[in-house]
Each structure stands twice: as structure tokens, then as C-alpha cells.
Image (spheres, coloured by chain):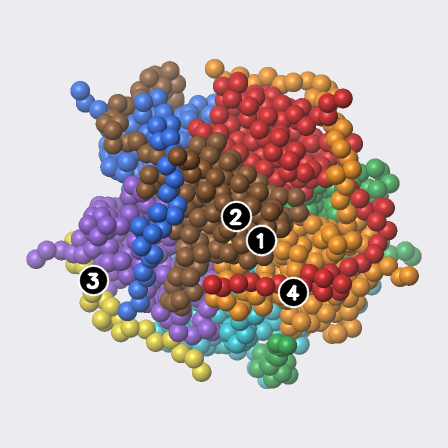
Chain colours: A orange, B cyan, C green, D yellow, E purple, F blue, G red, H brown
Amino acid sequence: MYRIRFLSSLLLFSIHSFPIHASQLQKPFLPLSSANKMVAAAIQQCERDGYEVSVAVVDKSGVIKAQARMDGAGAHTIESSFRKAYTSASLKLPTLKMAQIAAKDPELQGLHHMASNILLLGGGLPIIIKDEVVGGIGVGGASGAHLDEACATAGLISIQESK
Amino acid sequence: MYRIRFLSSLLLFSIHSFPIHASQLQKPFLPLSSANKMVAAAIQQCERDGYEVSVAVVDKSGVIKAQARMDGAGAHTIESSFRKAYTSASLKLPTLKMAQIAAKDPELQGLHHMASNILLLGGGLPIIIKDEVVGGIGVGGASGAHLDEACATAGLISIQESK
Amino acid sequence: MYRIRFLSSLLLFSIHSFPIHASQLQKPFLPLSSANKMVAAAIQQCERDGYEVSVAVVDKSGVIKAQARMDGAGAHTIESSFRKAYTSASLKLPTLKMAQIAAKDPELQGLHHMASNILLLGGGLPIIIKDEVVGGIGVGGASGAHLDEACATAGLISIQESK
Amino acid sequence: MYRIRFLSSLLLFSIHSFPIHASQLQKPFLPLSSANKMVAAAIQQCERDGYEVSVAVVDKSGVIKAQARMDGAGAHTIESSFRKAYTSASLKLPTLKMAQIAAKDPELQGLHHMASNILLLGGGLPIIIKDEVVGGIGVGGASGAHLDEACATAGLISIQESK
Amino acid sequence: MYRIRFLSSLLLFSIHSFPIHASQLQKPFLPLSSANKMVAAAIQQCERDGYEVSVAVVDKSGVIKAQARMDGAGAHTIESSFRKAYTSASLKLPTLKMAQIAAKDPELQGLHHMASNILLLGGGLPIIIKDEVVGGIGVGGASGAHLDEACATAGLISIQESK
Amino acid sequence: MYRIRFLSSLLLFSIHSFPIHASQLQKPFLPLSSANKMVAAAIQQCERDGYEVSVAVVDKSGVIKAQARMDGAGAHTIESSFRKAYTSASLKLPTLKMAQIAAKDPELQGLHHMASNILLLGGGLPIIIKDEVVGGIGVGGASGAHLDEACATAGLISIQESK
Amino acid sequence: MYRIRFLSSLLLFSIHSFPIHASQLQKPFLPLSSANKMVAAAIQQCERDGYEVSVAVVDKSGVIKAQARMDGAGAHTIESSFRKAYTSASLKLPTLKMAQIAAKDPELQGLHHMASNILLLGGGLPIIIKDEVVGGIGVGGASGAHLDEACATAGLISIQESK
Amino acid sequence: MYRIRFLSSLLLFSIHSFPIHASQLQKPFLPLSSANKMVAAAIQQCERDGYEVSVAVVDKSGVIKAQARMDGAGAHTIESSFRKAYTSASLKLPTLKMAQIAAKDPELQGLHHMASNILLLGGGLPIIIKDEVVGGIGVGGASGAHLDEACATAGLISIQESK
């Protein structure tokens, strides 16, 4: 017989907290304030260079933290900048590097098909804090992959601590 | 009888209307009348050339304004003509040009994967008014990409102002 | 180093440029600067109210202009805030209003299934300039739809011209 | 200039052509000319009624024959008008009728989930020639399902033969 | 003679009757009985050849008429056989021919991305009746594209009229 | 002529073959011959009843074994018959039963959203051999869920062993 | 033999490493060892209760850490258990609680449509460490939502620190 | 008139069991216990080799049996490891072998597009019991396809019966 009976939600909530060895569970994390800074800096660079782009910053799981599309940038740049950011964060390498790896060996053509958000095209860079990848930045819309990457680099530089 | 009654649009608008410096906010725009003209002209050209095609016209964000599929044109041409129109409008270049760029450099293979509606295959052209891209036209179904592009060109010519 | 060089834009534009009656083709437009202002204001409001949310601003075609996810906001809020913004911009009504319309009549249940990005849940508002919808703002992640909408309203107010 | 040359169609056809009892294989068919007429008439009606809509006409398999989006109609109406046309053509009933059926019995809630393009919301009508459904017309964007249906009806009437 | 008449709901249905010149509206059509015959023949051939495959037959719009998966054939063959059938029906050419065209010119790489169901890989053939494409047959799962095509050919031959 | 040659299967198998306690690893299995029989019987029943439907039979993992669409059955029935078959096979219950369960309790509305192929609508039945579910049969296109189910039942009866 | 050699990670990191105020960037984190423990415990509980289920554990961004499907559990449970885990992690509430909220108010029907992976159906619980949600656990396949939830609870208890 | 009337579920259930020649219907089957063993062994190997990966094991229909993502492995590895496992199970060959086949002949480029879950990239191996493929194992995240495959091989070896 099919039956549905639910636990009291009060009871449920009281169970949920579990003291675990916290020392092993701390991970560096990318705050929105830094993501916003990076997006603004990347856009500023592309504006200076004369390109209309979108910029995306994702956390280490590839979920958007901040994104912006410049006036005039094509609709597809929302998707391409996100995919570049996602790819860098998840593969922990610049997308340009991955595009070069895939280009060298026909047996690695499958790299382009690894997952639905993967984009092996220059313009995405991993964001690394204390040797740990905490996210990725992606830029799309300039007239060449290296130009997109230049703006992404400006984004990274913007959160570098001044001494 | 069911009915839908909305809030008076006057009331709604009085809450959300924000006077902004309008001078900076005007953008050229592609009307449906022009889109229809373009679709008809592109189909007429392909009919004359002996091809059964679909033709799509999108606005600058890549959303369909008008589309038609000739009798006998395959089901996939609805998708291919749309993707070509989307790609031209968003990248602001002929899809043939983009296909050539992608073909020359294996490191640019990723261009084919930038976004789900991107199609780098001849037959799509940006629609440009007063130096601003306002949309794209895409044709699919002829026996070659340059033949599709010929019909797309006929579409563009149709909205050219006679002196 | 690989490079991408495009056709001279002059050449391209001279082929595809069509003088049309421009007077009929001007439309108001939402600039990124306003979108950024709105996202920041909506986040500030939700922060003040104690909620961790995402905020999205889209143009009138429903394409993202700017988006941000507060530290701690769930991954799904990227999607829900976008869908609310898209829905308001495209339906030209608050998503809360649409949710109420759908709730009143079982024959309108289909409204929830109109399109893949439609979300009829409070928290999305159309952005209206000079009586024309130019985009939408969506907020997701607070503990109730009306709380999300309060932050979206703060976003709208932020771009209101001071006299 | 690159070129695509296909096998002579004569050669191809001589291999794959199969004489079958043709008498049983003839089916009525909706030509593009009629589809265009219907789209134009439906749009004219909605314009007269003061609504900005999209109109889609599909063949009996649910593939677009013609579609148009009025200036000002939301992006989602491309999808909603298509889904209504698809649903009417495939279910051979007005979408309003199907919405009423689904609304009456909670056990039929699943009707909304039958297939990805199904939309049970008034505004879609089957197109019937000689007692055979040859396609569907769908309208989306007016302020109520019955208003969308009124425009769809105008589309149907437009292809009625004058005596 | 063109007419629209609905089943029930008398008032609504009585509005939709439209007499049109029927002479132009007849199209050849692929019946299920032929589709079943083709699937059985293609499977019989592959069984004889020692391969475990799926076979799909679609109508001219690319919608499945009949499909079967042999014991032992992989799950993906349902999708690959369908895509081959869809592609042949919609492009009106053998998928092997299309694969060869795409392989010869890097600028035609985009052919692989024209639409979500397109598959340019040998094993799909158009079904042609009286010089009109009425559908497609696709086979997937054998150890080579030409082996898949051999079974598809057996399917086509099975519906050839004996004199 | 291009060719594909695989590694000797002997070599391949000698590497990857693992003798395991086979006794625990045997599971009943639905052969294509039975699936074909069921599809034919279900179609025959619906034909007799005056309905144009699609019938799908899936294995216990929900992958199509056989499917057919009667002449005149709508395009969506390919998807709805598959989803009903998938749902019965995976949930091991008639889809009608599941639709009733979901209808009784608003807190179970989520059942409709469990997975992308789930369809809680009468017309799907699990196929059970020796008390183990080996697949599912789904029918879509008749004028009511119980009518679809009647045809599915005829499919099940067709594979019952005569004594 | 083909090989992939990456840039020295030292070189890469020296370019992209940015010292930030690390103190603000530490977040608790769910290790695979705990995820595995939870999956095993939840399965053990459901086995004891006589149900065949899938169990998923996701990190706080909703990405799978560990998942398992018991012998006999339906194919859809992979998707339903994941969606429940995703939903709890992202909404930071039991999915049962969310299902109850959605059921009480028709205007909250949209909650079911917030994002593609959302599933408001009992059986998902957030995983909370030191008052911070670090992931979610989801169970699908038992004969009722409360039974799924019971197994999910067993999963949570398994990682509770013994004093 | 549209009506729904349902068979008693009791009656339905009594019909469902069909004595068939069971001898022909037994198939070897991969139990969860073996899948878990394989995942653990593959992860152990990659850990030893210094890589952070995901490992997936699927049944012969390509549905997940067990999956795990090591701490630090990118989000995309959930998708890539699954696709490799799916591809090996369904094609009954190592994904590396398939990648080599596709790389050798440009006319086989379509192999990458056969189905949405196909991934032709080293790291996936079929699981074979008594000469019958019962599933697949896939590994993603190491710095090279052959490194992924090494871990997958360790997974296979782990279930080999010791004499």
C-alpha cells in the first residue's frame, strides 16, 4: 500500500547540525565583492581596447557569481563568456591552453564534447587563491580569442593585493 | 466563460515609469514590415534558383521576427535558417566569414561550440541600419552555403531604400 | 601566436548598409550602466533585509545585461532570478501579478508552460522607460516572493531620475 | 570560392525510387501560400484589437511553415505561439478545449507534461482540409487566451474559399 | 475542396470550415505498414550480417513512424538510428553522402551543427516515392557506417513493388 | 571506400573479462520479438476501437525496444507513448495509478517533475515476467487515458503464454 | 601512444595567484569520505525498510559528490534523487517542507518551475556543518516521500560526530 | 464526449504476470556491490597517481549504478565520467579506441554527434562478464586520456575473481 506520512519539520530541523572535524573542511572561497571587481576591470579593459563583450565570473563549481554584457555585445556572449569561465574553473587551466591541446591531436577532439558547458576557446582563466582554484573568469565578444583573454587577465589583476 | 483582466496599464505604468536621459537610450530597430519583406524576397530568389529553403529574420537579440518554410523544404531548415540568422545578428558578421575563420585555425574549433544557437555555415548575414546591426537573416536548404547566402543577400537588398 | 583578422568593417558595412526611414526605427534602450545600478540596489536592499539572493537584469528581448549572486545564495537562484526577469520583460507585467492570474483559473495552468524560461512567481518586474518596456529585473532567494519583489522594486527605484 | 556539388539526382533517385500503390498514399497538404495568408490575417486581427502578438502556422507534423512576431510582442511569444500551433495540429483540437479538459480532472494534470512542445492554453486551432488535419495555427501575446484565439480564428477564416 | 470541421463542441467547431482548391494539396505519404516492413527487412539483413542494431523509419517531417532495437544493441542506437533517418528525410540525401561533403571542406564543418537531430554519418537513406521524399530510414550499431547503410538499403528494397 | 576495423574482439575480451559469481547476476530480459508482438497487438486494439495512436515498448531501463505510430496519429504521441512506457517501467506501476496518487495530495505535485521523461497519465503499464519488471508499454493518442490503457493491456495480453 | 603534457603548474600558478585576505575566504566543505558514508547509510536504511532506491549527495553548489542506485531501483531514481539533493542544498530546506509550502498557496505553483533541477518532493535534506549548508542528500524510489526522507535522515545521522 | 474511466488497479495487477520461456530471457547483470568496488578502486588508483577525478559506473543501458567525485575534481567531471561510461557500455568498446577510429577518417566525424551522451575520449571501458557487456566504467579529470583510462582499468581489475 502506498502511503505518505511526514515527519514534523520541527523535529527534522533539530537533527540537521553535525559537528565534524572542521579543520579539514575549510576551503578558500571567492566573494561577490571580488567577482564584481573582476567583471568591472575586464569590461573596462575591453572598452579601452574597443570591443563590446560579456564577462562572467563563476565560483569553483562553475555557478555564476557575477556577469555583465556591454551595450552592443551580442546575445551569444552571455553564453560564451559563461562557458569559458565554467571551463577554466572546472579544468583549472586557461581555455586557450585547452584549445591548443585539443588542436594538436585529433584523438582529443572529444575534449570539445566532455560536458554541455565546456568551451575550449581562448578567453577563460582560472581564478587561483593560495594555490587553490576558487573560480573562473570568461570573456566573449572581442575580435579574437587572445583579445578576450587580455580582458580576462585585466580582471584577474584587479583583485591582486597591493602590498 | 473564463476571463483575464489585467490591472489598468495606466496604474501599472505610473508605478514603474522612470524618466531617464532618453537621448542616450534610442537605438535603431527592425520592424516586422521589413522582416516580412526580406523573407519574401529571399524566398523569391531561392524559388527562382530552384531551391526549397527556409528563411528566418531575427532582431538584434536573435529572437525571430519572421520565418517561412517553402513547400518541400526539410524540417531541419527551420532550425538551420534560425541559427544562421541568430549567429549573424549576434556576431555581426556573415556566417560564411565565420566559417572561414574557424576553418583556418584548429585552435578556433571552439567557435562552433560557443553557444547552443551558433551555426558557422554560410547563409546568414547581419542586417545593418545606419552602421548599427539591428538583426540577421538566415537561409537554409539550398545545395550549398553560397547558394543560401545568395538568397539571404536578395533579402537584404529588398529593404534598401530606393532613391 | 595565433591571430584572428576580420574583413575590414568598412567593406562589410558598405555592402550591407541600408538607409531606411530611421524615424520609425528608434526604440528606447536599457544601458549596462543602469542595469548595474539596479543590480547593486536590489542586492543592497536584500542584504539589509537579511536575505541572500541573486539579481538579474535583462533587456527587452530577455537577454541578460547584468547578474550577481550574493555570497551564500543557492545555485538555483541564478536560474530563478533570470527567469523572473525574462518573464517580466516579455510579458510586461510583474511576475507576482501573473502568478495571481494563473492561480485563479485552472484553465490557465498552461501559462506556466508557455516557454522554457517563463517563471510565474513573484520577484520579477518590468523596467519601463517612457511607457515602453525596455527590460526586466528578477530577484530570487529570499524567503518569500513578496520579499524578492521588495528588492526588485528597490532596483527599479535606483534608476529613477532625481528632479 | 568553395562549392558543394551533389550526386546527380537522377542517379540517386533511380536507386531509391519505389513504385507503390500511390492511390493510398495521397494526403492533403498545407501550402506556404495559405500559411502566409493565415499569419497575415491573424496579425491584422490582433492589431485591430490592440494586441502585440506572435502567430505561428505549423504543418501536420508540427513543423513551422510560417511565423511572425509583431513589433513590441515579447520574446516568449515565439515559443508560446509555436507550442499552441503544434499542440492543435498534433492533438487535432483547439488548445482551449484541451485546457478545459485538463482543468476538470486532477488525474489529467499529466496532459501538460505529455511532450516538450505541448501547451494547453487557449489560442491554438487545428487547420482542417477535407476532414483531415493538415496543420495548426497558434497565437500568443494578447491579454487573454480567448483574445489569442480570436486572432487564430481570423487566420483560419482567411483561407476560406469565397464562392 | 477545402474544409475545416471539428469533432465536438458544436459552436466552436462550426466556425472553422474552409473550402480550398484541393488539387494542389495532395502529397504522397508513407504508411505505417511500409515503415514496419522496412524496419523488419533492415533488421533481418543486419542479423544475417551478424550485427546488433536499431532501425528507425521517419516520415518526411522527421517524426518516427516505426523503430526497433535488436537484443544486444546499445542504448545509443535508438538515438543514432533516429538521427540518421531524420537527416536523410530532411536533407533528401544519404547521410554517407553528406558525411563525405562535410569531410572534404573544413568550411562546411558547420553542417554537423545545423540542427539538434542532424547526424552526418553513413547509415541513413531517404525514402522516395514517385520522385518525392516521403521519409527516411536510419540504421545504427553495426561495426561501420557502410554496414549500417547496407541494412538500410535492404529496408528500402523491401517496399519495392514486385512486377 | 572507407572502412572501420575494430580490434580483434578476442584480444579485447581477454583483457576485460571477469569471472564473477554468475549465479547472482542473471536477470529476466524482454526480447525484441515480444516487444514487437506487444506493439502490434496494442495497435490492433486501438485500430479496432477507432483511435490513431503511438505505442512504445521499453526495456527495464526505459530504453525503447520497439515503437510505432499509426497513420494519422499526432507527432506528440511518439513522445507521450514513450514517456508512459518509461514511467511504468521505472516506477513499476501503471501510469494511471501514479496519476491518481499525484492527484490526491497537493504535496505530491512534485511527482510530475521527478525526471524529464516521467509522465503521470493513464496509458502506461509495467511488463512483468516472473514477478520482475522487465519493461513497460505506453500508448498515446486515444481520446482518453483509459482508452490508451485498454490498448496497452491488449499489448500485455499478447505475450501471455498459452498453455 | 599519444600524450598530453600541461604547462608546468608552477609557471601557471605564478601568473594567476593572487594573495587576498584569506581570513574572509574560508568556507566549510563536504569531503567525499563523508558523502560516501552518507550514501552507504541511506542505502542500508532503505534496504532494511524493503525499498530499492537511489541516493545522491551533492556539494553546496548542487554538483554530485557521490551517488548510487540499488539493484532493482528504476532508472528515473538517478534523476529524482539528484534533484532532491540539489533542491535541498540550494534552498537550504528539506524538500518536504518546500512541497508543503508550494501546496498551500496556488500563487506559489511557480516554485515547481524555478529551475530545471528543482524538485519539491519529500526525500531531500540539506547537509549542515557548523550552521552552514555544505550540501544536500536526496533519496528516490521508496513507496512514499516520507520513506525516502527516512533513508535520507539515516544518511545525515551517519556523519554525526560521536562524542 | 471526452470521458475517463479507469480499470480497477486490482484487476490490472492480476493480469500483469506472464509466464514466458524464461530460459531465453536470462541476462548477466552488474550488481551495485561490484559497481561500488570498481568506483573505489579507480579512485584509489587516481589518488595514488596524483589526480583528482570523477568515476562513473553504468549498467548496460547506460544508467548510473555508482558515481563519485574526488575532493577537488572539477564540476564537469561528473558529466565527462558519465559520458565515457555510457559510451563504452553502449558501443562495447573502450572510448580511446573509438576516439582513434573517429580521428583517422574525416567522414567519421559524425561519430561524435551520434547521441547526446556519447563522448569519444579515452577513459571509458566496457565491463564484460562471461563475454557479455553488462556496463561501463568512465573516469574524467586526470591530465590525459590515457591516465583516466589507467584508473578505469584499475576499476575493472578490482572485480576480477581471484582463483
Q: Earlier in the sequence, mark 1 or mark 2?
A: 1
Q: Position of residue G24 (x, y in %)?
A: 84, 46
Q: Residues within 10 Å of mark 2 (few under 14, many from 20)?
A: many
Residue D12 versus residue A18: which sits nearer the camera?
Answer: A18
Q: What residue would you read off at disc 4? A: G7
Q: What residue would you read off at disc 3? A: D17
In 3D space, how far apart are the residues under numbered discs 4 and 2 (Cα atoms)?
A: 22 Å
User: Which three-letter amino acid code belongs to the residue tagged 4?
Assistant: Leu
**Badge 1 vs badge 2, beta-carbon distance below 8 Å:** yes
In 3D space, how far apart are the residues under numbered discs 1 and 2 (Cα atoms)?
A: 9 Å
* Chain name for mark 2: H
Disc 4 element: loop
For the residues beneath circles 3 and 1, the answer to whether they share a chain is: no
**Badge 4 vs badge 1, beta-carbon distance below 8 Å:** no
From the image, which quarter does the N terminus of chain F lie in?
bottom left
Q: Position of residue D65 (x, y in %)?
A: 42, 58
Say which residue appears at 56% left-offset and 70% top-offset.
Answer: B107
Q: What residue would you read off at disc 1? A: H142
